[in-house]
Amino acid sequence: MSISIDNPNLYFKLFYLLAFTFIFLVVIYKSIKRGYHLRSVLLMLTTISLFTVIGSRLFTIPILDWVNAINTPSLVFNNRSAIGGLLFGLVGLAISQRVFGFNRPMLDLYAWMGPIALGIIKFGCLVNGCCYGLPFKGFWAVHYPKGTHAHFNQWYSGLIENEALQSLSVHPVQLYESLLLFCIGYIVWKTHNVFKKNASALLFGLFLFFTMRFGIEFLRDPDGSQFSSIYYWGLRSYQWSMLGYAVLTGLLLWIYETRTKKEFIKGLQNSPYIHVDFIYIICISLILYTFRALLSSYELLVIWIKFVPAILLSLYYLYSETKLQRYRVLTSFLLLAPFYILAQTIPNQIPEIKQYKRIDFGTSFGDFANEVKYNPTQGECGTSYSTEYYKQVYQMVGLGYSQVTEKHNKTYTYGINLAGGNIKSTNLETNVNQSDFMLAANPFYKFDGEWIGLGFGLQLGKLRVNKDETLDVSNIEDAQKEYNILPEFYFRVGPRKYLDVDFNYGFMMPSAYPTLYSRTSIGSSFLLGHDYSLRYGRILNLDTDYVSAEALITDQFGINLMYVFRDNSFDYLNYDTSGKFVFSLNYRFGHKTK
């Protein structure tokens, strides 16, 4: 089997982003269900991502060269190590657990998610041609084209001629490793309740991981490794280290579970103290600023997509909590400092793009409640209604395609989005529920000038919009009316780079969100360009607030995030709605600079 893909490094970046996105979505979902403070959860995710990417880099660099590496652009020191990322990531997990006091379920969650995320990244390694295997002639063997690590190293070793178009056939060892990592994640997930103590599942996962890496190295080509190829008694020094780590973690797990009564990591209640978050944000910002030259743009992306919403949530809490009023001015300046650092990490040599195509992938999930009045009855004081209350739980995904043209500080965008998902309606009084599938197609057009923005479109299909309704009928079957066509429009006024105000009716695709239809906000791009924004707004039809952020990290990848704060309207029904996330990634291609 031949692997010959144009720009394979792009696919490595894609799988890298998918791995961190997987962790992000699962942790946020589990955190919402358990009622954790989301700002603390996002700061924990930021810490783990930051330590993981730094560790994956530093683990491949001699300690004496660390200072030089930190001050050198990432293209010079560009090797990565899954072992380094895993070990440093666990340090980040331990630090954030200690600061915020997350309990055992969060530790067990990472015990099985970590191997699965590494398994996703290994698919990128398979396509990219790094970490390749020994020569092998089985029917499932792979060979790589000229220009890849495998081809170059085999030519350098004299195994192939310089004119050879492809490398020798080799073991797809990255695929083996990926499948084994998925198995490790599954085993840890199925067995985590067997252990009696916190962190035991993590130790068990590490034991399996190090054992797997010891065995897999028998099939990996030593020339494709960035570590020492010195042999001792028939094994490479790297294999001996993996074997030593496996024995150490296995022994530590046995002693911890059977011979000690002390917990390594105590499970405490999730920390509610906002001043801890403020100090923590400043510390993360300083670390990011220190290592900004070492990290690549997509590595910075996986950090900022968690860090930005964490900062926004902390700002919201600062202004919504009356006891913090005296600290608002000073603390606001401190919390805006990371955005200056964000500006320093954005590449400043991106060519001026005049036209490009764009693919968006989005998802949203959450719950909400609404009130439906029906069965009108005329009385002495006017019309009275029977009332029913409904809980709605939804999961949506969307895919969009658009073309963007820029002329004289004006942006013209047209395209189409597709979205689908499920919404489950439950009557809060009778507990009767029903599930419905939602599907939408959304052609749209949007114009953004320096001072004015306009847009319009249509949503077509099987649609739902959450709102409180009054129906002049004697009975109802569901809490919402179904639509087949809905208009959408967008209006903005003000200079984008400084401060602007907008109003949206619809215009949420492809991250379709059935309840978030009418909203207004104020925001700025902080002089970074029209692909960047930080906004605070109001959901008019829900009477609640939201924060959103948008950023372009490279000329190919962008990110959009929105967090909607919980709605208090139905607290008297003992139904506590949670915060809601809308998340999308976009990939840009076909760039034209003229």
Image (cartoon, helix red, strand yellow):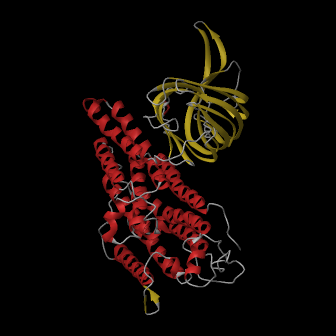
- Judge by depth and name the residue closer to the eye, 394 or 561: 561
- Residue 38 appears in the figure: no
Residue 388 % position (x, y): 60, 28
Residue farthest left in this picture: 326
Q: Is residue 93 left or right of residue 223?
A: left
Identity of the residue drawn at 43% across and 79% down: 242
Identify the image quadrant of residue 434.
top right
Q: Is residue 7 above or below residue 351?
A: below
Residue 207 % position (x, y): 44, 75
Q: Is residue 147 left or right of residue 1?
A: left
Q: Is residue 250 above or below residue 396?
A: below
Question: Considering the image in quadrants, where does the N terminus appear?
Answer: bottom right
Identify the image quadrant of residue 415.
top right
Q: Is residue 470 above or below residue 210?
A: above
Q: Is residue 247 left or right of residue 583?
A: left
Identity of the residue drawn at 37% across and 79% down: 248
Question: Considering the image in quadrants, where does the C terminus appear?
Answer: top right
- Residue 177 appears in the figure: yes
- Judge by depth and name the residue closer to the eye, 147 or 515: 147
Q: Is residue 457 left or right of residue 120?
A: right
Identity of the residue drawn at 33% across and 58% down: 95
